[in-house]
């Protein structure tokens, strides 16, 4: 037989490196998985609370890049002992009841998940140092309504400025609020009212850097030990001290979820047609608007509604806030007050 004659017995067959078992799209059901709540995220590792014990977990391969955030209820398999050095796997995210998100700006399509399964959004705003930013509050209110969360306005540093003028801008909203101030001996007056508003609820705290959010969390949950930063005297802005969200148990029941301070709260994920629905003090005035009114045009009936005083003394400011949000959402103006 010549060198190049065909002989199948001499052909070397390479082994299948993937094995002989056919591929399947079926995934294991993990019926033995235990369910826990994500309380912290740090560099690709999640802290999950199961029956009172913290477990460190990683994301299973089948979840790919699925977002897992604080507040998520997840299914775990593997080593769920919680012992030092142990590592479990997150194989499933349970259905979310709420999901709070934001974007970097109003035209950025990339959503940034903040927290899941909270039922209350506490918007923390300082009355001074740094100065309050009503349009930031309006943005957070829109995000809360869109996510299905009840809003709560928490006003800090009342020892530096009266809350009256700021609250007047929201007089027509029936917006629940609490006010705190620091006394001369360093005690937070109003802390009991804050605690009562958070009791037995899962509350996520959102606010600009420097508004006193971490100070408030440390007072509510003494073992939290959240870092506290000062406000820059030149820019009037706070320095970021919290670098990641964390869920902390509240004495007597409930959870407080502290988040890093934000300097913008984009609403690219919210339908702009729904904006007016979240301004109840203005929404009724749109009944006489022309068909297809954007609420930011000369024929809009809201101008007459506000001029007649139906939206209250802060109606003009509220209407301007709505229209700036609409313009920012469409990319025709950049809102600098966020």
Image (cartoon, rainbow, N blue to C red):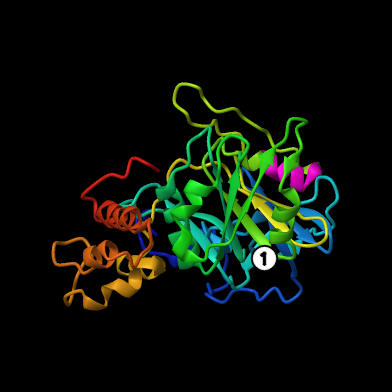
Q: Classify 36 as above or below 338.
A: below
Specify the quadrant that holds the C terminus: top left
Residue 335 falls left or right of residue 238: left
For label 1, the SS is strand
Residue 18 appearing in the image: no
Residue named by callout 1: 74
Residue 279 percent coordinates (x, y): 39, 65
Q: Residue furthest left?
A: 298
Front residue of 206 and 84: 206
Q: Quadrant of residue 111?
A: bottom left
Residue 314 percent coordinates (x, y): 38, 55
Front residue of 232 and 174: 174
User: Which residue appears at 53% of the width and 72% of the height?
Assistant: 23
Q: Is residue 220 magenta?
A: yes
Q: Residue furthest top?
A: 234
Crowding at dot 1, Cα within 10 Å, few <14 / some 14-19 / many 20+, comes out as many
Magenta residues, start to end = 215-222
Front residue of 169 and 298: 169
Q: Is residue 77 magenta?
A: no
Magenta stretch, main secondary structure class: helix
Specify the quadrant that holds the N terminus: bottom left
Front residue of 255 and 191: 191
Residue 314 falls left or right of residue 285: right
Residue 113 percent coordinates (x, y): 51, 55
User: Which residue appears at 62% of the width and 63% of the height?
Assistant: 118
Total marks placed: 1
Residue 294 falls left or right of residue 41: left
Q: Quadrant of residue 312?
A: bottom left
Residue 249 appearing in the image: yes
Residue 65 percent coordinates (x, y): 51, 56
């Amino acid at each position: 037989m010549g060198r190049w004659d065909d002989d199948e017995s001499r052909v070397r067959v390479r082994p299948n490196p993937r094995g002989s078992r056919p591929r399947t799209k079926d995934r294991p059901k993990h019926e033995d998985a235990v369910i826990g709540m994500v309380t912290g995220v740090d560099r690709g590792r999640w802290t999950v609370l199961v029956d009172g014990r913290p477990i460190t977990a990683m994301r299973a391969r089948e979840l790919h890049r699925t977002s897992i955030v604080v507040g998520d209820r997840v299914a775990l398999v593997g080593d769920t002992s919680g012992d030092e050095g142990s590592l479990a796997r997150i194989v499933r995210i349970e259905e979310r009841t709420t999901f709070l998100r934001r974007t970097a700006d109003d035209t950025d399509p990339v959503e940034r998940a903040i927290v899941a399964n909270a039922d209350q959004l506490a918007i923390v705003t300082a009355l001074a140092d740094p100065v309050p930013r009503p349009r930031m509050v309006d943005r957070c209110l829109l995000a809360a309504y869109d996510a299905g969360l009840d809003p709560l306005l928490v006003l800090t540093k009342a020892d530096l400025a009266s809350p009256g003028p700021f609250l007047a801008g929201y007089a027509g909203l029936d917006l629940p609020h609490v006010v705190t101030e620091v006394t001369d001996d360093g005690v937070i007056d109003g802390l009991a009212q804050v605690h009562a508003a958070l009791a037995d609820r899962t509350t996520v705290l959102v606010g600009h850097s420097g508004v006193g959010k971490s100070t408030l969390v440390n007072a509510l949950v003494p073992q939290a030990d959240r870092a506290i930063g000062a406000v820059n005297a030149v820019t009037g802005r706070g320095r970021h001290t919290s670098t990641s969200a964390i869920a902390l148990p509240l004495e007597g029941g409930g959870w407080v979820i502290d988040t890093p301070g934000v300097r913008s709260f984009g609403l690219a994920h919210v339908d702009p047609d729904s904006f007016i629905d979240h301004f109840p003090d203005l929404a009724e005035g749109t009944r006489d608007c022309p068909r297809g009114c954007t609420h930011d045009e000369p024929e809009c009936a809201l101008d007459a509604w506000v001029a007649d005083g139906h939206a209250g003394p802060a109606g003009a400011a509220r209407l301007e806030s709505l229209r700036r949000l609409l313009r920012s959402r469409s990319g025709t103006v950049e809102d600098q007050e966020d």
